[in-house]
Amino acid sequence: MATAQSILNAFRRTFPDCSQARALELLNEVDEEVLSLIPLRKSTFCIPLVAGQAWFDLPESIVRVYRAELVDENGRRVPLEETTEAELNRSAPGWRGDVQGLPSRFGTSASMTGGTGFLWPAPSSTSPVVSSVTAGSPTSVGFASAHGLTNGLPVLLIGGPGGRDLKGFAKAINPTTIQLFADQALTVPLASAGAAGPMPGLASPGRPLLCLDASVHVTLSESSPMPNLPQVRRLYANGMRMIWAMERHAQQAEFWRAQFERDLQAQHELTLRRATGVQLRIELVHQDPDFRSRGGSF
């Protein structure tokens, strides 16, 4: 893996008038824009369902959600249909009411303070909120409040130690802790090793989990690892050149915008060839040369 510094160096060879600090800011801006269009850095997030609650906050690190699924204790995954508030207003005018059931649609809504997600219909069950996962033999799972699980109940831990999903049976240690076993008689510990995922969750009978497949932005530093692919490094460097040209070298802005757009399209086509199944339309936030002067942001 290359580091972000190699991209910063490539950019500053073109525009040495840009400081290292500003170049790093540009890199993070480009990272958010790229991730909003192409799933280069993805993670799975588990969102516990709350009975009667259709709306919930999205983790701040999520840039774009590409897939939403309900997952039960057997590992069965049911994709949710992507929708919008406008579509639901047309097709289900009373959707903001008290209708509850098994969610079949999912959507997101951005705001100045962050992103939110919504489900329709609102879920009729509440999932326990995982607060900690401890690797070992057996694996231990802690909850933010009483889990309500009984001994021998089948469960599925998603995003467990080592990034694995663990299917087993629960042994209630106390109201907020369980251990996982491979058999319903609770004689064979379900072992694990490594760190858990960013937002693990637990599905149990009648209480499925909402799992989001999403692009994730993390604040990049000079030493942050980056894909060691020339086309990806060029994509990021050209995005930085585009923004800096729009700020300080207007006569070059259109040229670098075209280069960035070309690289985005090429990376998009490569992603599709790798069978992601995601259809993306490339639309640049920075196409308008007056974008920054009007105070626009991502």
Image (cartoon, helix red, strand yellow):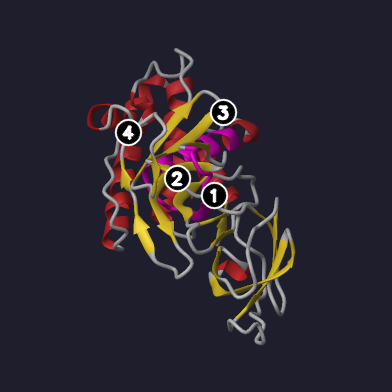
Extent of the magenta region: 24-53
Q: Which residue is the site of mark 4?
A: 84
Q: CB atoms at circles 1 and 2 under 8 Å apart? A: yes
At 28% across and 45% down in the image, what residue appears?
280
Calculate the distance from the C-alpha at mark 4 to the C-alpha at mark 1.
Answer: 24 Å
* Disc on the earlier residue, 3 or 1: 3
Q: Identify the element where label 2 is drawn.
A: strand
Calculate the distance from the C-alpha at mark 4 to the C-alpha at mark 2.
Answer: 17 Å
Give the x, y percent position of residue 55.
48, 35
- Does the segment drawn in magenta span residue 33? yes
Q: Which residue is the site of mark 3?
A: 17
At 32% across and 33% down in the image, what residue appears?
84
Q: Identify the element where label 3 is drawn.
A: loop
Calculate the distance from the C-alpha at mark 3 to the C-alpha at mark 4.
Answer: 44 Å
- Does the segment drawn in magenta span residue 294? no
Rendered position, 170 above or below 108: below
Calculate the distance from the C-alpha at mark 1 to the C-alpha at mark 2.
Answer: 8 Å
